[in-house]
Amino acid sequence: MLPMDASPQCAGMMAVAASQYAHAILASRGEWATNEKTLLDRAGLRGVDAIIAGMTPDPSTLAAAVAHLRRLGHERLDAD
């Protein structure tokens, strides 16, 4: 069971997941990221900002945000 408002924990885990997707996307291109300031941009994952910003404490919204990030990550991996 999740705490009453798990959105901060969920947002943090999603930020980590987005970074891991970005590293995987760049690796699939044979690129290596040494500066994480541009990591999401280079991987085409800047849309994750809007996903995280749109989260609310509602568990169904959190689950939808996670699913959206997963789709975005897979789409970018498959595109490269």
Image (tube, grey):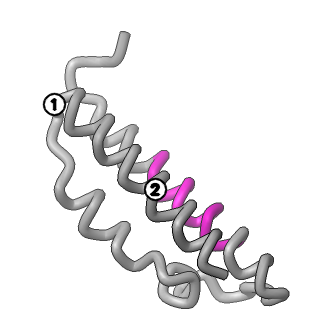
Magenta includes 17? yes
Q: Does residue 55 appear left or right of residue 21 in this picture?
A: left
Q: Residue furthest front?
A: 79
Q: Residue at x 78, y 77 (%)?
A: 28
Lateral position of residue 58 relative to residue 41, left or right: left
Image quadrant assignment for residue 76: bottom right
Residue 77 pos. (x, y %): 63, 70
Observer-nearest residue: 48 or 6?
A: 48
Q: Is residue 35 left or right of residue 60?
A: right
Does 36 appear above or below 50?
below
Disc 2 or disc 1, which is closer to the eye?
Answer: 2
Residue beneath the point at 45% across and 51% down: 14
Label 1 amino acid?
Asp
Mark 1 and mark 2 in contact (Cβ < 8 Å)? Answer: no
Distance between the alpha carbons at the discs numbered 2 and 1: 20 Å
Helix, strand or loop at mark 2: helix
Q: Which residue is mark 1?
A: 58
* Outermost residue toward the right in this view: 30
Dot 2 amino acid type: Arg
Magenta extent: 13-23
Of 6 and 64, nearer the camera is: 64
Does residue 55 belong to the magenta stretch?
Answer: no
Q: Helix, strand or loop at disc 1?
A: loop
Tell me the residue that label 2 is attached to: 71
Q: Could you say which is closer to the camera, residue 79 or residue 40?
A: 79
Chief secondary structure of the magenta portion: helix
Q: Measuring 38% from the left and 40% from the top, which residue is drawn there?
A: 10
Quarter of the figure with residue 62: top left
| Between discs 2 and 1, the one toward the N terminus | 1
2 up-or-down from 29: above or below: above
Q: Quadrant of the N terminus?
A: top left
In the rendered image, residue 3, in percent from the top left (x then y), is placed at 30, 18
